[in-house]
Image (cartoon, rainbow, N blue to C red):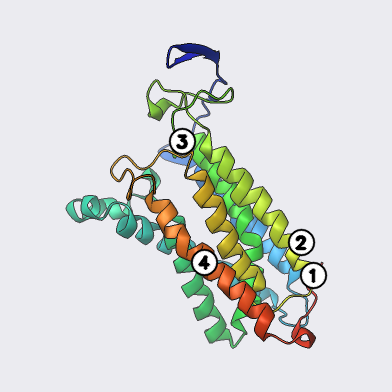
Amino acid sequence: MEFAFLGTTFAAIPYPEIDPVFFRIGPLAFRWYGLMYLLGLGAAYWLIKSRATNKNVALTPQQLSDLIVFAAFGVFLGGRLGYILFYNLSFYLQNPLKIFAVWEGGMSFHGGLIGTCVAICLFCVKRGLPIWPIADLAAGAAPIGLGLGRLGNFINGELFGRTTDVEWCMVFPQGGPDCRHPSQLYEAGLEGILLFTVLTIIWRRPAPPGTIFWSFICGYGIARFFVEFFRQPDSHLGFIVQWITLGQLLCLPMIAGGLFMVLRGYRTTPVSAYSPQSQ
């Protein structure tokens, strides 16, 4: 298709309008977005199970199942509460019943991260397990769910990018007539594929406990901060400070804190305490 931008006509890639509901049974509707969450959790279970054999931590099948359940609750509850508190508190104060309308969307990664961290800490305390090795296991698998979640955003036609004239721009149904960056795919590639690859490389080398977790925190912050330059800010928020969005603002402490903790781990942990991870 052709598209006009600032008086110039150019070709754009048609947006593949996929029905967000992939299966219906009477009044029940099963959505691609929910399926992506389930696939992410399933993939995380498989990966953590395959990696949880090193000398720092060995999880029994029951402990592994419990970890996934704890993490899932942390993601969903933290993600929902984070969106309500960070992004649209006034709306939900006026419409409290909408808090439970999760099928309408509204999840925050930063809230989900906080919720997951709390859940993992609770799991480790209740099971008497070391926190950092467990956190490394969870963080190493997290990019899979992030990448799949962004694909779900793309299918829903939400969280699209800013207006552009690049050859691969798309006109999203909810984005008006403007051709936009498919920023969901940028995030799937950076927060999902690239971050997973980097963490896997780190995983296969001896490293202080907590390195994978803090590398994930820093890496996600960098990827999200970059993609925010192409992603359309939330309409009810806009830019927080000049060109800075709320997403970028929340990523700054992640980048600084993650980098500091990784460097601190290598400086303060004796090399003899490093343990090679399982392949």
Asked if disc 3 and disc 2 are in contact, CB closer than 8 Å, the reply is no
The answer to which of marks 4 and 3 sits earlier in the sequence is 3
Q: Secondary structure at mark 4?
A: helix
Which corner quadrant holds the N terminus? top right
The x, y position of residue 194, in whole percent, is: 67, 50
Residue indicated by mark 2: 201
Q: Secondary structure at mark 1?
A: loop
Residue indicated by mark 3: 160
Residue indicated by mark 4: 256
Type of residue at label 4?
Answer: Ala
Type of residue at label 3?
Answer: Phe
Left or right: 51 in relation to 140: right
Q: Nearer the viewer, residue 208 or 200?
A: 208
The answer to which of marks 3 and 1 sits earlier in the sequence is 3
Q: Secondary structure at mark 3?
A: loop
Q: CA distance from mark 4 to mark 2?
A: 21 Å
The answer to which of marks 4 and 2 sits earlier in the sequence is 2
Residue located at (57% from left, 73% from top): 260
Residue indicated by mark 1: 205
Type of residue at label 2?
Answer: Ile
Type of residue at label 1?
Answer: Arg
Left or right: 135 in relation to 58: left
Q: CA distance from mark 3 to mark 1?
A: 37 Å
Q: CA distance from mark 4 to mark 3?
A: 27 Å
The x, y position of residue 13, in whole percent, is: 57, 21
Q: Residue furthest left?
A: 94
**Residue 232 higher or lower than 146, as above or below:** above
Asked if disc 1 and disc 2 are in contact, CB closer than 8 Å, the reply is yes
**Residue 156 higher or lower than 63, as above or below:** above
Which label sits in the foreground, 1 or 4?
A: 4
Which label sits in the foreground, 4 or 3?
A: 4
